[in-house]
Amino acid sequence: GQSLEQPSEVTAVEGAIVQINCTYQTSGFYGLSWYQQHDGGAPTFLSYNALDGLEETGRFSSFLSRSDSYGYLLLQELQMKDSASYFCASGAGSYQLTFGKGTKLSVIP
Amino acid sequence: DARVTQTPRDKVTEMGQEVTMRCQPILGHNTVFWYRQTMKQGLELLAYFRNRAPLDDSGMPKDRFSAEMPDATLATLKIQPSEPRDSAVYFCASGLRTGLAGVVTQYFGPGTRLLVL
């Protein structure tokens, strides 16, 4: 089975940097994905790490350490529009994803 | 800009009634997923299809839920009979493999907000 743990809530100041951690336990592992969901909206894909290391996409970066069963999403130069829930997800198989419970990020002025 | 579409966007029904939710995946995507999201349970995978064939529906209550994909442009999720505990947002997603050994990147529809009274 799959199990992913992430903090339920994080608050950060506009312009700052925030890191959202995710630890996982999986039987079989196909990388770690991150999705963003605004209130009332649908999850949208942010990033995917198949291998150890850092993947950067603009203000967002994602990191994976397979030996530690750990990853994080790093958001830089926070903007008010980044207030949303962020989900880590891992694949038991290459098609299937199990999502964590999500981290609600609140960006304050 | 290709998107997954879902209908209806909102549905209010009474306990015992049949509910049918529809999804049109992105053209060219060969995997389709159905999820249910609640505050308590989060995002739960109900079923998924690859090339229209059901691969896994173990997350779905079989006695009342059924998922089908009659053609490549339509996926359906039915609940019969519906119960108040089925109240949730139901998302459809279609997927595209990322890289040779990568997982499928999933593109979510806007969801169907279901309320069973």
Image (tube, helix red, strand yellow):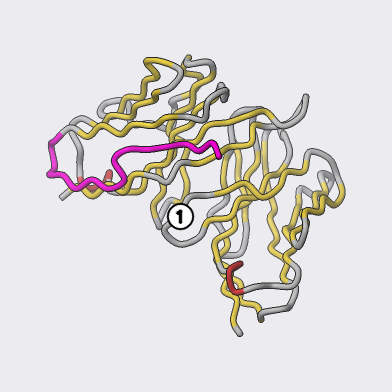
Query: Based on the displayed image, in which of its 4 quarters is residue B9 positioned?
Result: top left
Residue B110 drawn at (x, y percent): 42, 46
- Residue shown at the point (62%, 59%) measured from the top left: A6
Query: Based on the displayed image, in which of its 4 quarters is residue A109 positioned?
Result: bottom right
Viewer-side residue, B80 vs A26:
B80
- Residue shown at the point (76%, 69%) measured from the top left: A76
**Residue behind mark 1:** A41
- Residue shown at the point (20%, 30%) measured from the top left: B80
Viewer-side residue, A27 vs A16:
A16
Query: Residue A34 vs residue A83: left or right?
Result: right
Query: Based on the displayed image, in which of its 4 quarters is residue B19 positioned?
Result: top left
> Measured along the vertical axis of the image, is residue A47 above or below residue B23?
below
> Measured along the vertical axis of the image, is residue A79 above or below residue A64?
below
Residue B13 drawn at (x, y percent): 16, 44
Q: Residue reaching furthest front?
A: B1
Residue B6 is one of the magenta-drawn residues: yes
Residue A17 drawn at (x, y percent): 75, 73
Residue A26 is one of the magenta-drawn residues: no
Magenta segment, which residues?
B1-17
Viewer-side residue, A45 vs B56:
A45
- Residue shown at the point (34%, 44%) measured from the top left: B112
Please report, as a chain letter, where disc 1 is located: A
Q: How many marks?
A: 1
Mark 1, secondary structure of its residue: loop
Query: Residue A95 vs residue A77: left or right?
Result: left
Quadrant in the picture for the N terminus of chain A: top right
Residue A46 drawn at (x, y percent): 66, 50
| Other residues around mark 1 within 10 Å, as few (<14) / some (14–19) / many (≥20) | few
> Measured along the vertical axis of the image, is residue A106 above or below residue A41?
below
- Tell me the kind of residue under disc 1: Gly
Query: Residue B56 vs residue A79: left or right?
Result: left
